[in-house]
Image: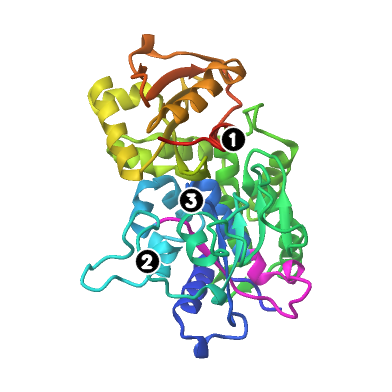
Amino acid sequence: MAPHKSLRAFLATARAALTAPPSKRTASSPPPLHFVVGNESADLDSLCSALFLAYFRTYSPLLRGKDHSRNILHIPVCNLPRDDLALRPEFAAVMRWAGVQSLDEVVTLSELLLPLSGSGGEGKKEGGGGEELWILEHEETRWVLVDHNVLTGALAKAFGNGDGEGRGVVDGCIDHHDDEGVVPPDARLRVIEKCGSCMSLVVEECAKAWEALGEEEKGGKSEDGDMKKINAQLAKLALAPILIDTTNLGDANKTTPRDERAVAVAEAWIADAADSYDRAKFFAELSALKADLSPLSIYDILRKDYKEWVEEGNGSSLKLGTSSIAQPIAFLVDKAGGEEELVKELEAWATRKELDVVALLTACEKDGVFMRDLLVWARNGPEVVEAVKGLFEGNGKETLGLSTWGEGRLDAEDGEGSWRRCWRQAGLRYSRKQIAPMLREALKGVGKT
C-alpha cells in the first residue's frame, strides 16, 4: 500500500474529485460521492473531526466498510459558507499546524452550490436556505456525520429523505450528543457515546488504523513529506478540539477517560516525530484565538457558533436558535454599547433568523475561574412563553444553578408573548449539549398564536 499523504495533499485530492465530472472520477471516488460533515455550528470539534475521519476512512483498509472491496475517497465538508471561515481564527491556526497554509484548501458548503447567475455569490442565505442550486443530486451522495447524528438545515433539505430529517443518504455517524434515533442501528458506522469532545470518539475509532498505517510506513516518506511529520500534523489536528472542549483535560464536568486516552494517542505520535510541542502553550494559544471576539460585530459573534432546530408544535413549527459565545454577557453589553443596545441587536438577530426562542450560552475563564452565563428570550406567543418560562422557573432553574444577572437589567416580560431572562449559571457542566435538548423538549407540542 502506498504511504498516505499529507493532509494538504489529501484535501487537494478531495477538491479535485468534487469538481471532476462523473466520467473523470477515479476508482477511489466513483458515484455516489462520500462526504463527512460536522454540525451546523461548525465549531472546532465539528470541523477537525470531519477532516480527521475523512482522511482515515480514505486511506485505511481497517476502516473500509464490509461491502467495500477497496478504499473510497471521503470528502470532508466544513458545514458553513466559505465567508464564515473568517470568523474562526482558531481553525486557521490548527490548519497551519496541520500543514495546511490556507483555508482556501478546505471544502465548504459554498463549493457544493452553483453560483446564482448575476449575483456573483453563492446561495441565498447564510449556511443554506432559499433556493440553492446544488452541484449534486440526492442520489449522488452518501454522508457520514460527526458531532451530530441527524442531518440538519440546508443539507437535510437537499440530501435527506425529503422531510427535513436527514435519513435517506446518511451512511453513519460518530457523535457525543443525545441519540435522536435517525441513524439506523445497522448503519455501517454508528458510534454515539458521551465524552468531552467528539474528536475523542473519532480518534478511538481510527486509532488501530493509524497505528497500522504507521507500522507499514515506519521510516518512510510519502510523495509529499516525511511520514513522522505528517503523523505529528494529524495529531495536532486531533488534539486541538479535545483540549479546547475539555479545558486542557482540566474540566471535571466534561473530561472522560476517552478524552484522556485520545490525547495520549495523539501525543505519542508527536513524541515519535520529536516535535517541539508543549500542551499548555498549545492550549493557551488556541484558547486566546477562540476567545478574541474583539474584531467581530455582535451579529458575527451570534453567528460564529450557532445552531438551530425546528420543533413541530400544535399546528405550527417553532424555531430555537442557540449561540455559544466564548465571552461573558458583560462583554456583549459593552460591545453593543449598553443593555438596551444589546437587546436591539438580539431582536434584529431573532427577526432575521425567524426565531421563536433565542438562547445565548456563554463560557469563559476569568482570573483562573471558569464561568457561564445564560440568556433566554421566548418570543411570538404566550404559549411559547409559558413553555420556556415553565422550564426555567421550574426544575430547570435549580438544575442549572441560575441566579439573576446584573440585577435584572436584561430581563423583560410584556405579558403578551415575550419573556426574556438573563442569569449567571452555577451549573457549569451544563452546556448547549444539555440545555438545547431541554428547550427542544419544552417546545414539543406547543402552539403559537
Check disc 2 and report its element: helix, strand or loop. Answer: loop
Q: Earlier in the sequence, mark 2 or mark 3?
A: 3
**Mark toward the start of the polypeptide (1 vs 2):** 2
Quadrant in the rendering for residue 170 = bottom right
> Looking at the image, is mark 1 or mark 2 nearer the viewer?
1
- N-term mark: 3 or 1: 3
Residue bearing mark 3: 40
399 shown above or below 179: above
The foreground one among 51 and 385 is 385
Q: Residue at x 37, y 59 (%)?
A: 82
Range covered by the magenta-colored residues: 56-80
Q: Please give left or right for residue 272 compared with residue 372 in the image.
A: right
Q: CA distance from mark 2 to mark 3?
A: 17 Å
Nearer to the camera, 413 or 111: 413
Location of residue 307 with respect to 399 vertically, above or below: below
Q: Disc number at residue 370?
A: none
- Asked whether disc 3 touches disc 1, contact meaning CB atoms under 8 Å apart, the reply is no
137 relative to 161, above or below: below
Q: Which residue is mark 1?
A: 441
Quadrant of the rendering where the N terminus is positioned: bottom right
Q: Which quadrant of the figure contains the C terminus? A: top left
Q: Give the CA distance from mark 1 to mark 2.
A: 31 Å
Q: Which residue is pictured at 73% across the width and 66% down the height?
A: 63
Crowd band around label 1 with a 10 angstrom C-alpha radius: few (<14), some (14–19), many (20+): some
Specify whether residue 220 is in view: no
Q: Nearer the viewer, mark 2 or mark 3?
A: 2
Task: From the top left corner, tell me how far across and down residue 65 is, in percent.
Answer: 74, 70
Rendered image quadrant of residue 304: top left
Q: Which mark is residue 132?
A: 2
Q: Secondary structure at mark 1?
A: helix
Q: Residues within 10 Å of mark 3 (few under 14, many from 20)?
A: many
Say which quarter of the image contains residue 277. top right
